[in-house]
Image: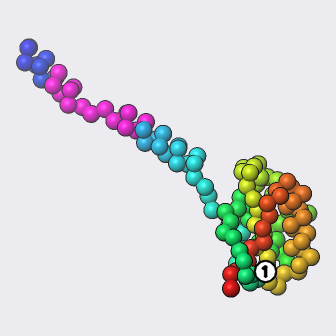
Amino acid sequence: MARRSLQSATEEEEDVNVTPLLDIVFIMLIFFIVTSTFIKEPGIDVVRPVATTQEKQNPAVLIAINENDEIYINKERVELSEVRYQVEELRRETPKGNAVVQADAGAKSELTLDVLQQVKDAGIQDVAVSTVSD
């Protein structure tokens, strides 16, 4: 009987408890998800105009205007009247973010200016127009 209790005691000691390891893995996973930045894509390819000076931007809001004067935000086509509402929704996710408008070289300048005004009316003052360097 004494042997039997010694064997069961040693078998219990050999078990590895992985619960603390799983806790650490899940905490690290949550940390990386919360601190990650996701890439914003407009949803269409735009032929951007050429500029001599430019700065790299990491926008919170990315708006694209194609050569047919269609506006896209997050791969969805939106009307000009909806731009302000969509930008306000995206601004809630990142309140201090900026915006970039990618206007095709064939798009109407008036539409680009109207979109820029809608973005500013939504509360984003740091708005840039995307270009291609020489």
Percent from the top left, x then y, of residue 70? 83, 75
Percent from the top left, x then y, of residue 110? 92, 76
| The residue positioned farthest toward the front in the image shown | 53
Vertical placement of residue 6 versus 126, above or below: above
| Residue 82 visible in rendering | no
Q: Amino acid at mark 1?
A: Asp
Instruction: Examine the residues drawn in magenta and state their main secondary structure.
Output: helix
Q: Residue at x 86, y 67 (%)?
A: 116
> Magenta region: which residues?
8-23
| Residue 130 visible in rendering | yes
Percent from the top left, x then y, of residue 1? 8, 14
On screen, residue 5 versus residue 110, left or right, reads: left
Percent from the top left, x then y, of residue 95? 75, 49
Q: Secondary structure at mark 1?
A: loop
Determine which residue is flagged by label 1.
104
Image quadrant where residue 44 sits: bottom right
